[in-house]
């Protein structure tokens, strides 16, 4: 019966992937286009991600340059970045928007580390929720005499091992992200 829970494992994998995507939006001390992934601008009446309205480049380690395909979007992009929680003031020269990433202060690093911890905890909670759903499912199977009590015990153990594996994965990824954030 070992590993006969692909749907639950798949959900746990997706949870970890989502957390990693969230981690990418948390900036460390260097420029990364991923920090803009959650920021949208109004473009022809639709909220559109910045990376879909222009070209984003990283000319130097602490600088992002956004070149919109439509020059009328410069002000919108600037406003959206100012409204976000990036903590960076954009500059606009009429053609492009520049984001200079200052070196993070110790306080800001700690805030970002806290945010990463929050995202990891959300992932852990989601994984435990998936475990609960799986446990409910197998208990129902046992109650309906679809599986034996021994099968139930084996399944519970397997699901717990799966949960432990993904929680450990979350913890390892969090350690990496914290190291990246706190690195000077």
Image (cartoon, helix red, strand yellow):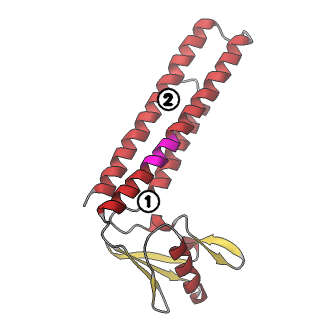
Residue drawn at x 66%, y 16% as measured from the top left? 139
Earlier along the polypeptide chain: callout 1 or callout 2? 1
Q: Position of residue 95 (x, y in %)?
A: 49, 90
Q: Position of residue 124 (x, y in %)?
A: 50, 38
Above or below 7: residue 184? below
**Residue at the limit of the structure toward the left, as seen here:** 184
Above or below 81: residue 22? above
Residue drawn at x 45%, y 91% as measured from the top left? 93
Residue drawn at x 34%, y 48% as measured from the top left? 176
Name the mark on residue 49: none
Would residue 109 appear left or right of 40 to someone viewing this image? left
* Region rendered in magenta: 117-123
Above or below 156: residue 26? below
Q: Is residue 61 magenta?
A: no
Above or below 143: residue 120? below
Query: Label 1: which residue?
Result: 26
Q: Quadrant of the C terminus?
A: bottom left
Assign a secondary structure to mark 2.
helix
**Residue at the limit of the structure toward the right, as seen here:** 144
Residue drawn at x 51%, y 76% as measured from the top left? 82
In which quarter of the view is residue 33 placed? bottom left
Name the mark on residue 163: 2
Residue 146 visible here: no
Assign a secondary structure to mark 1.
loop
Q: Nearest to the eye among marks 1 and 2: give it.
A: 1
**Residue at the limit of the structure toward the bottom, as seen here:** 94
Q: Position of residue 63 (x, y in %)?
A: 36, 76
């Amino acid at each position: 019966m070992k590993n006969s829970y692909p749907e639950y494992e798949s959900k746990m994998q997706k949870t970890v992937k989502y957390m990693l995507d969230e981690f990418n939006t948390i900036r460390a001390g260097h420029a990364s286009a991923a920090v803009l992934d959650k920021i949208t601008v109004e473009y022809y009446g639709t909220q559109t991600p910045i990376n879909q309205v222009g070209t984003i480049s990283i000319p130097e380690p602490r600088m992002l340059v956004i070149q919109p395909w439509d020059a009328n979007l410069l002000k919108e992009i600037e406003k959206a970045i100012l409204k976000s929680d990036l903590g960076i003031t954009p500059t606009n020269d009429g053609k492009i928007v520049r984001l200079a990433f200052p070196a993070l202060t110790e306080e800001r690093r700690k805030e970002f580390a806290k945010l990463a911890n929050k995202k990891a905890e959300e992932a852990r909670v989601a994984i435990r929720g998936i475990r609960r759903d799986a446990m409910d499912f197998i208990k129902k199977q046992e109650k309906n005499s679809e599986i034996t009590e021994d099968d139930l015990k084996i399944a519970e153990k397997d699901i717990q091992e799966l949960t432990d594996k993904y929680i450990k994965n979350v913890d390892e990824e969090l350690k990496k992200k914290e190291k990246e954030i706190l690195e000077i």
